[in-house]
Image (cartoon, grey):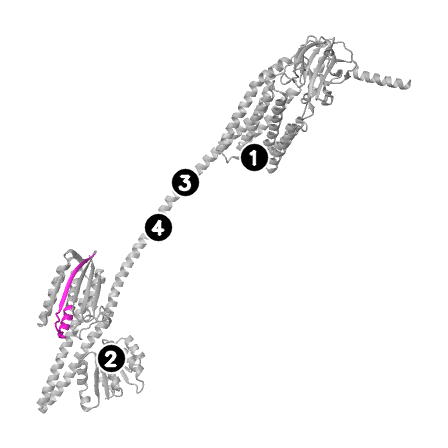
Amino acid sequence: MKILVVDDELDMQTLFRQRFRKEIREGIVEFAFAVSGEMALEYLNKNHHEAVLILSDINMPGMSGLQLLEKIKHKYHTPPPIVMMITAYSDQDNYNQAMKLGADDFLTKPVDFTLLKEKLKI
Amino acid sequence: MKTFLVIFLFFFCINSSYAQDTTLMLSPGMFNGSEEIFISTMDGWLFREGHEPGWANKEINLSGWRKLKPAELSAKLADKNGKLEGWLRLKVNMDTTFGNMPLGLRFYCWAASELYIDGNLIQSFGNTGADGKPFKEFNPNNKLPVRVTLVPGKEHIIAIHFVDEVVLYSGKLKSEDLGLSLFVRLTGPRFYSFFSKYISNWPRYSSIWMSVCMLLSVLFWLLTFQNPREKNLRLIAQYTTIFAFSVCILTLREDTSNSFGYYKIYNSLYFLCNYLLLGIIPMIISQVFKHSVPQKLRILLVVYTVLGILNAIVGIGSQSVGIALGVAISLFLCIYYLISSWKKLRGAQWVIVPGLLLTLFFLLGFVALTVYNRSQNIPGIYLFLTGFYLSFPLSLMAYVSLRFTEILSEVRENANQVMQLNEEKKDQAVHQQKILEVEVARQTAELRTTLENLKSTQSQLIQSEKMASLGELTAGIAHEIQNPLNFVNNFSEVNKELLLEMKDEIDKGNLEEVKAIANDVIGNEEKINRHGKRADAIVKGMLQHSRSGSGVKEPTDINALADEYLRLAYHGLRAKDKSFNATMVTDFDPSIGKANVMLQDIGRVILNLITNAFYAVNDKKKKGIEGYEPTVTVSTKKQGNKVMISVKDNGMGIPEKVREKIFQPFFTTKPTGEGTGLGLSMSYDIVTKGHGGELLVNSEEGSYAEFNIVLPT
């Protein structure tokens, strides 16, 4: 399973690699990273069948996570990528907006990786 | 024979009818209580046209004479030139009871005449032209009788040479004007003295009447012009003026030397005046009693005027009948108004009533005295005349004066009412003022309460705004803290797993793997440490931000302040980064003086801007652009009553998109962890909210950024 993580914090990449190091080692998941919405879209354009799951931050410089979500859901109908939002903003507004724009799930920071793994069923 | 007889008888009759010589028997009883016997109307007169001086003789041939009383003379007898000349003869026999009674003959006629008694010329009246001089009419006004001696019991012949002219416009003899029945009168013993007294008193009394009437008319006109709103006055003034005029005319008419023409003119005017007066009197009565003049009365005045002109001037109808009719109508109207207003009469109106009644009374008294001539009381005659002439004008004067008294008292009453109203109003005003004062006090108290409520509301608002801004911050803070926390938590958990793995590897003795894991753990620990500090910096920045705005403003030397913080910032950065270097340029305007600011806050702003500027030039320098000289310029400048502090760097500048957001809390362009994103937003708040100034930004992307603090001094 290929997962695209979109976050402006570079440490996120290290964190994901370390958290999923067993799964990566066993070849269950494969990660791709983007540090902005723009880069995420660029990646999706190039490898658009690869990423099955997109995990995106909301608060990023430039394109925000919600804008990215909207673009993805608008552009890529088949197969519909699963988009999960991961954000420090855990308020209802953000949640509602994300859901309205078609987010499949909504996780808050600090990320509970056990819960995330459950959701990914790995 | 029979025919002859008839003719003879006829001539005899004519002869006897024309020339029967009868004697008029006169007795004192014929005075009938008066002093005059009007002998013109009595039988016994003979008349013959033409002129013979001998016709005055006692014994003459009476053939050619006919019976004709002086009262029967008329214009018909005049010749074609309109001249009537003839002789009148009367044989009188005085009763012996006359005794030595002094008698007179009064000629009251405009004709010229000569009186002969028993052939002797007694008196000429005017000039008959018998002496060759031209004809001259006789003015009979106020002429005394001629004293005559008629011996009682003896026959006397009274012969009158009579010459008169026909007046062209009336077609009548001049003598007919007064009525020839009044022509010759035998006057009694007291008549002469009575009449001479009457005549001698006339100028005195007529002067009094004229003066009084004229003065009154002047007075009334003055009052009329002074009081145009009193309509009564105008009528009264008009009446009095016409009345004064009529009295003047009367006096002129009564002049004994007037010619017949002037007499007629004065007489006509006098009668016309009387018609006018008779028309105005009911109007005055109506105006005074009912406060209005009906249209009918105005029409009556016009009718009177027209009739007066026709009667008095043109000579249609009898003047005495016309005046009598006028008097009757006006009297009737006055009585009608008097009776109909009787119950409504008030105050001054009453004065008119005795005026009217007295006028009537004096008129009747005068008529009684003169027409019946039962009294030779001259003072009485003049008293009645004076009363008749003046009682109405004087009553009008009394009315006017009383009316003015009424007006004055009305005015005074009105003035009192006005005063009273003023007093009441003043009281009311005072009362209202008191009410107002109470109301103002109440409202002031209410306002004060409201103000206090407002103040507390305001402070509540400020509090809640703080809370809101805190809430706003909370979201940002949450995000900013959650991010480092995310790493702290997860990396520490990962480290625990890694350390567990490392233990396994140590047990396995796989040292290479242990080393690798240990390096990962160290790396993670560094990350944990870094993110922990990041959270710390955020909290500190937040605290700093929340402190802003408190404090007291004090006069501060802005130039010194800017210089101090420039050095602080530079050395602070040099301490952290030994490689950092930049050119500092200062351009301070010494004229700006001191500005009233909160020292700590403005210092924080300047420090923040300078730190940003150093960061920007340092960032650009790291890019290794050739020939780049990092420069930060701090300058001050006076702008009217404001001070501008400018911090300029020649760094990369601020992209336009970013420029809009730089003052938002937690917005930062620095890499994550290096800035809190609160610096500019805090600075913005300090400058705008704390000092009422402006924080402006100018920039060109890639070449410079300039922040300007504009502060009111």
Answer with mark 3 or mark 1, whichever residue precedes in sequence. 1
- Left or right of B11: which side holds B236? left
Residue A14 location (% of width, % of height)? 17, 83
Residue where numbered disc 3 is placed:
B422
Which mark lies nearer to you, 3 or 1? 1
Marks 1,2: beta carbons within 8 A: no
Residue at (64% x, 31% y) in the render: B307
Q: Which residues are magenta?
A: B613-639
Q: What is the quadrant of residue B201 in the picture? A: top right
- Are discs 2 and 3 both within one chain? no
* Quadrant location of the C terminus of chain B in the rendered image: bottom left
- Are discs 4 and 3 both within one chain? yes
Q: Decide: is B494 above or below A91.
A: below
Q: Decide: is B241 above or below A118.
A: above
Protein chain holding label 4: B
Residue where numbered disc 4 is placed:
B439
